[in-house]
Every structure is written in C-alpha cells, then in structure tokens.
Image (cartoon, grey):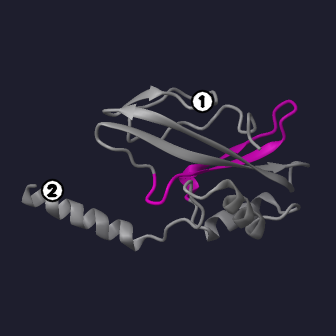
Amino acid sequence: MTRLAYILALLTFALVGCTTPPALHANMTDPVLRTKLAESFQPGMTLDQVQGGLDTLHIDHGRRMLYAPEGERPQVLLARLFPPGGFWGAEGDSVVEWVDVSFVFEPTDHLSRTLLYRDGMRYFYGDPVNKPNREPMARFPRWPALPPPPKNPLEGAT
C-alpha cells in the first residue's frame, strides 16, 4: 500500500469513527426493527415528529424520501436503512442489502402504520447486475451511487 493510500485510509476510518452510527440498521432482524420502531414512532404522530424521530436515531436525510398521496396511496415517508457502516460494496463482486421503512400517513397528516421491505442488489465491478425486486424510480447508477428508491414505497411492504 502506498504511503498516500495508507494516510487516506486512516483519515477515512477516523472520520467514520467520529460519526454517530444510526440506531436502526439493515442487519437487525424484522422483529427487532419493529420493536425499535414501535418504541420511537407511535400512530398519530405528525410528519415533523417522525422526521424528528429519524433525526434522533441518526437516520440520514439523504436516505429519506417523501411520497405525496397518489390515487389510492396515502402520503408515505420512506427511510432506507443500510448495514452498519453504510452503503458499501466490495471492489469486485458484492451484494448490498437494505431495508426500506415506509411511514404511512392516513389521513395525510398523521402516522397510521409503519411497514418494512427488505431488498438488495448485486454489483460486479461497480455495475449493477441484478436489480432490486421493486420497480425503481430512476435508472440504476454504477456503484458507489445509491440505488434509487422504489416507485411505490408500499409495494410488497409488510
């Protein structure tokens, strides 16, 4: 390893070590995730309260997306959870997994339920090989760009 690469690796590890990891992550089992979500998010909460709760749990704003009501679908806030350490893949062949948490607001301004959907995709030398199960909102970029959110955040979620 060159001296510069070594220094950059140390700086990266130092910076990652200084950030507070999210309290929820994709390596948790569904029962554990549901319990932790129920502790922090109760039916009747407003969108602002849910956003504040996600802030408290250190869920990055860049991993959230608000879906406006459309047809039969109510307003939904999607929060994407990656494994501890974030969205990382190996240099060659790797699979990245995540959990989408859908906060459903019915009526539009109050939380009625919280749903989970597990997904992932395989990358081969940075190219997306197999796509996630739900239809994406946009085309898939090369790694390390994040996979796009789903068109419908409620499809298949339980």
User: Residue 49 is drawn in which quadrant?
Assistant: bottom right
| 94 displayed left or right of 25 | left
User: Disc 1 marks which residue?
Assistant: 136
43 lies above or below 63: below
Sequence-first disc among 1 and 2: 2
Residue at the far right in the pictured view: 107
User: Residue 67 is drawn in which quadrant?
Assistant: top right
Q: Give the range drawn in magenta.
A: 60-86
Q: Identify the residue at horizontal 55%, vertical 46% (top origin).
A: 98
Question: Within 10 angstroms of label 2, few (less than 14), some, or many (20 or more) residues?
Answer: few
Question: Within 10 angstroms of label 1, few (less than 14), some, or many (20 or more) residues?
Answer: some
Locate residue 133, reporting x and y percent: 61, 30
Disc ID at residue 44: none
Query: Does dot 2 land on a helix, a strand or a loop?
Result: helix
Residue 79 among magenta residues: yes
Q: Identify the residue at horizontal 80%, vertical 44% (top origin).
A: 75
User: Disc 2 marks which residue?
Assistant: 5
User: Do labels 1 and 2 touch, CB within 8 Å?
Assistant: no
Query: Does dot 1 land on a helix, a strand or a loop?
Result: loop
| 144 displayed left or right of 66 | left
77 lies above or below 126: below
Locate residue 109, reporting x and y percent: 86, 54
In space, the residues marked 1 and 2 are separated at their CA atoms by 35 Å
Quadrant that contains the N terminus: bottom left
Hey, what amino acid is under mark 2? Answer: Ala
| 47 displayed left or right of 13 | right
Locate residue 99, reporting x and y percent: 61, 48
Residue 66 among magenta residues: yes
10 lies above or below 2: below
Hey, what amino acid is under mark 1? Answer: Pro
